[in-house]
Image: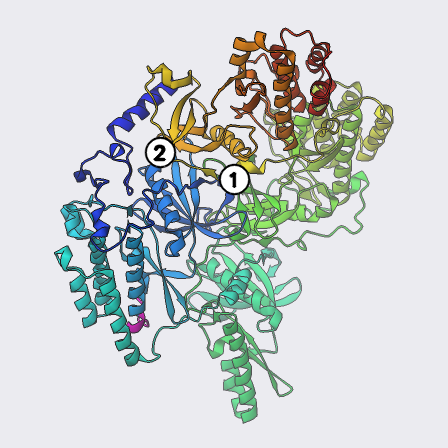
Amino acid sequence: MDLIFLALSVLFISNANAYKITGLCHKPQLNPRPKEHGYCTPDDKHIFKKYGYKDDGIPADLSGFQPHLLHESSIVRYFDELGKWKFLASGSYADVYEGEMAETGVKIVIKQYDDSSEFQDVNMECRLLMYLSETGLFPKCYGLLVSSNELAIISIILEHVTGTENLRDALHRKDISVYQWTLILEQVARYLKLLHSKYVLHNDVNRGNILIKWNGSKPRVHMIDPGMATFRHGKYSSKPTDANRVYTFFDPTSEYFESDPANEIHGFGYLLLRLNEMHPNEDWNILRQWCRKPNRDDRPTTDELIHRLQSLQIKYRKLENDLYYKNTFNETKEVIRKQFMTVPIPVIDVFKLNPFPDVHGNIRFISYSTDHMSYKANYNGSLVMVHLFVGKNSFKSSRNEALINMFAEPFGLVPKFIGLCFYNNELDDVVLVQEFLQTLTTLDIAISNHSDKWTLKDRSLIACEISKSVLFFHDNNILINGINPGNILLKMDGGYPVIKWSDLGEWSDGAGFRLKDTGICNKYNFGLTPKRVNTCVPDDKNVNVFKKYGYKDDGIPADLSGYQPYLLHESSVVRYFDLHGEWEYLSNGTFAMVYTGEMRVSKEKVVIKQFTLQTDIWEIEQECKILMYLADTGFFPKFYGYMPSGPSLYNLTIILEHLTNTEGIAVTSERPEVSMYQWCLIFEQFLRALKVMHKKYVLHNDLHRENILIKWNGSVPKLYLIDTGFSTFREGTYQYMSSATLNRYPFFPQESVNFESNPSMDVYGFGYVVNKVNNHVLSEDLKIIADWCAQKYPEDRPTTDELLDRFKALKLKYKNVGSGYTNSMSGVLPKNAHQLPFLTKPIPILLLVDITPMPSISDTSEWLAIDEQHGSYKGVYRNKSVVIRLYSNRKFAQIRHEAAINLFFNSTGLVPLFYGMVFYDTSMRDTAIVQEYVVNSTSLAKAIERSNLNWTDVYRKCIACNILKSIEIFHKEHILINNIQSSNILYINNGTSPSVKFINLHDHSDTSGLLRDEDSEIPIYAAPETVQNTSTSYFSDIYSTCFIFKELFNPSECTIINEVINYCLTSKPKSRPSVKTLMALLCHTRDT
């Protein structure tokens, strides 16, 4: 019924609203609205010819320019320090964000429209951009992006024209000469002429839609936002008269008359008006009055404007000579500078500083100001200089100074940088720690104390060294902005000066603009709080939990201060997105959500663990340091660093290696194929991981199934442990929970209520996991081990060595018992899992007006098929017969999934020719697929029902072999069809040579297969194993194929065919033949 309502609603829209479209005129019957609604009559083509523009080579419409629907994974969004999309600008109907193309790294802007914008309107804007792409005037349009759960949120993906400023900002510059303004205005006039010659009106010429890019002293103009532009016709202002007084770039006459090129001249006059307000000049005023004359016919043409501006160029070039603005921006050096802006910054332990940073404490400050103070301290036995920042933006200031110091340190221009250090729970409570240089003093003090002893040569050498270091910064497009004697450190070494810089927090780029800080790591403390109240004191030698179990203290560090986490810049990590524009979710725990992404430079897959509760910073730092400490064991994911996710230190995000193609041990335990020998291998690795942890004086303290991952390499398992959030080093932990609460955590032993954790408690957790696995495996040997580990008293539990000996014996026992699980299915599947890259390729989007409208529900002759789930009708697209397939209760992702595979196989003949997708309404579910209408075709199910008795076995074999050839191609591309049935195959009657095509491919998958929905109806063609909660496979496709053959060859007297069908329909998947074997049996043998 939903589909019927959709059909009626679309039919109503098509008749009553006549395909609501802004911008472009289409066929008259599709745009019957009167002019007062803001749309021209499509036959009004005189507006361009009136101004001398010829119609030669101008297309009748823009249907030949077809935007593509981009997959969300092809777009990388940039983030600010709050974890929000990096905002660039906003307009009346859209917000603009920054990003890049995932594959090429090309910078883009993501223009996301509000929910009042209609897909057809945005689609038209994209087509206009494609039409105008050859002009070089507008940014390149890469395609459309559609996301959201229900209502479609539409975005256009555009080229990011970097290094530009809009005209509104440029008007505030005092250093742009009149001559340069004439160059800018001439380009705008030429571009308007170019637009008009292509029968396009911009209709929105204002300061915000013109960009300027400087190449030295030469400006280059770009235009943006053709959202109100029209092709082959004008536009009526939808603004009332009062609003036109606000939007002063609108021609007041457009309220009553269709816009034309003269309206654009009025908009040009608006630019002159604003220019004259900021830079008064009588020439601007005269030109402004000419462009804004009330009568359109009295305004100049673009040619007249260009001629007048060229005359002004001659006038002002002679007057001004070379006194004009020149941009010294060097793009190559800018790239180098931006690279050091994103490097990780060392973070050090605040408790290693003595004295502890405290603005109000008893500290003797060497220097101080309103926002910065410095004092001498001790760090790890060395003298250091601590710079303490105060004020609202302390973190940004300290980070900027940290970055410039890290950049300049290798060149000997600054004291050695030690790291940043956070001393409280706010991001701005930060200090910067550098080497303390006892032999150097500031230049102002040196001048005061020693200048009378300096010779002229000494002074010259000092000045020379200062100049050389300033030149270094300038060569790298960096301005110091704070050069004074107090920021320069000096030492005379054997008559030769040594210069170093301090307090570089005011540096900026070469244009003199302070770099916009996006916040690298918005959350740290890293040891700022005392030890946890629920943790024993590590210095308590009476509680040596590791020595008690025989682990020696040889080579174990006293603490983990030598493992130094790094702050990652947020731009160094790419977050993945799902269909709805949300971060791609992976899992969650008690304190954090886990998302997926990758490192921007190395492309390594990562997980982004974002804490959701106010977590003790010391605990988070300890988790990360333990991961770094255990990195060489091979049992834990790699730790990359910290990343910002908010303004508080409690919004920490940590970046970890993504262990791809793994599964939780709970999933593994549900695989009946996993043999006891393989379980011995898994648990042996588990124990080795525990043993190596304990040898390194680490306890996991949180062993349950969610923290254990298995990765299969064929039949060989590899075990990983994750989540060291509760782990401890050189100590145990107290759980501080009641016995009642403990019941909710059965992997903790009873003694954890009162006693510090120790290696035996990890063994207890190991036994808990073995017991849970054994609920599926049902092994007496595993039960004995689980019970052994779960002994009430710790001393009665086995050690890891005892358990390893037990599993060594079990391996010998079970080595030759059963074939075991393999993730490569007897060699038919490739060893590695295959992804389907075509699923993320751009998909063509069609205009609703180019498609035959949906027929009435009562007109059954126009519907090829219709029910509550889907419907299809025959129509026309660009004079081609097509089938339009609509769906009800199907998610957009499923529809796009089917569209992607049809597009991929478009050139093979396996599917009807795919033209694109079309959106019928604002909901993403209201999407249809448009494909070729195949003449002389019907579903194979209907063909069998009507004609089967008249077909010979030879003819039927020809059909069967065509089906097998098609399936072989799918399987060679590592694609499972998963829905092979006679109603999903088109039979084409070509006389003596029948052919087939596949339709309804929405259930296809990669080689990992699909699990059938438990609530769904079981189709009769489904392989038996898929009904029993087993994934589909190549073998299940074979079963479904032979089920068709059973229909096709009923009745048949061919012995081989009947044997082959029975061969395929066996209940044992691996006993079924491959497609290649089937083809050998059916297609290359004589009939018997």
- Reading the image, the residue beneath label 2 is 850
- Which residue ends up furthest to the left in the rendered image? 295
Choose between 61 and 258: the one closer to the eye: 61
Query: Residue 25: which disc?
Result: none
Q: Is residue 626 above or below residue 293?
A: above
Residue 252 in the figure: left or right of residue 629: left
In the picture, residue 588 is in which quadrant? top right
| Label pair 1/2, CB-CB below 8 angstroms | no
Choose between 1081 and 772: the one closer to the eye: 1081
- Residue 138 at x, y = what percent? 37, 54
Q: Which residues are magenta?
A: 172-180
User: Hey, what amino acid is under mark 2?
Assistant: Asp
- Residue 819 at x, y = what percent? 79, 24
Crowd rating for badge 2 (residues with CA inside 10 Å; few <14, some 14–19, many 20+): some
- Reading the image, the residue beneath label 1 is 841
Q: Is residue 363 visible?
A: no
